[in-house]
Amino acid sequence: MTSNATPYHLRVLRRLVTASASRAQRDVSGVLADIDGAELINSCLDQPNHRLLSIMAAQSYRHANGFDKISFSRLPGSDVRLRLHIWPGTAGAQSDPDAHNHRWAFVSRVLCGALANYNYAVAHKQTGEFMRYVQTPYTPEVGSTFAFVGCATLTQLDAIRVAEGGTYSLSAQEIHRVVVPENGYTATLALELAPTRDTADLYTASSFKQTGVVVDSPRFTSDEVRDRLTLLRDRLHQGAGT
């Protein structure tokens, strides 16, 4: 019977999809809080022939804001997406990430380490400290593009510090940026709800985005995904004292 049991990662995804149907972030937070992070990772690592790792690798990459984005595959017919965000330490953490919003609302749980989430109010103006870009969603055929649409000023509303085991959530429209300790390893488990917008906004003080130029970050290999999952699992075990 054990060999025919549904793998843990699929059971987790099904629970999250069910919880997200209500679009109540507290429902999703409750499911995220109950997930055994090490068991979730083991469920992916233990799949035969590493086929699951290959599928995950095709959707996983180093994000421009300095973290590794590891994507779990979606359930058929669902727009809900579960991801790991991993800041590996000094070499991987960007000290000044760009403020942005998303096409989806999301809920995130800190598996290990800590972070600070900064939220902002924006005023769009003809002149301003920040340049606003509109980002199109990524597709394998096209990649993603940015379009400069004007300037803006940002005013910090709050700074929420989230310790290991804590959760935070944002709507699709809220503008934020995440900062992690410079020399620390931090990993979060984030659930993206179904998209409610066609594009997202990014605010930067440097003009590094060229309008219309396709941006396509190199995808990880299955070995790179396995190595990152293995390191995270080991750190979770260390934190649990096992």
Image (cartoon, helix red, strand yellow):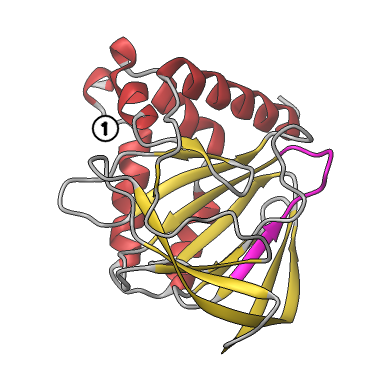
Above or below, 242 relative to 10: above
Q: Residue at coordinates 63% horizontally, 23% vertically from top-left?
A: 231
Q: Residue at coordinates 61% horizontally, 84% vertically from top-left?
A: 122
Residue 109 within the magenta-colored segment of the rendering: no
Judged left or right of residue 165, residue 169 is left
Judged left or right of residue 101, residue 239 is right
The span picked out in magenta is: 176-185
Place of residue 203 in the rendered image (x, y in percent of width and height, measured from the top left):
59, 69
Task: Name the foreground residue: 142 vs 70.
Answer: 142
Tell me the quarter of the picture where residue 162 sits.
Answer: bottom right
Residue 184 within the magenta-colored segment of the rendering: yes
The three-letter code of the residue at mark 1 reads: Thr
Task: Name the foreground residue: 131 vs 137.
Answer: 131
Judged left or right of residue 227, residue 46 is left
Task: Name the foreground residue: 189 vs 98.
Answer: 98
Circle 1 SS class: loop
Above or below, 84 relative to 91: below
Place of residue 134 in the rendered image (x, y in percent of width and height, measured from the top left):
43, 68
Place of residue 117 in the rendered image (x, y in percent of width and height, measured from the top left):
69, 65
Judged left or right of residue 20, residue 25 is right
Circle 1 residue: 6
Image quadrant occupied by the N terminus: top left
Tell me the quarter of the picture where residue 97 sits.
Answer: bottom right
**Chief secondary structure of the magenta portion:** loop
Crowdedness of circle 1 by 10 Å Cα count: few (<14), some, many (20+)? few
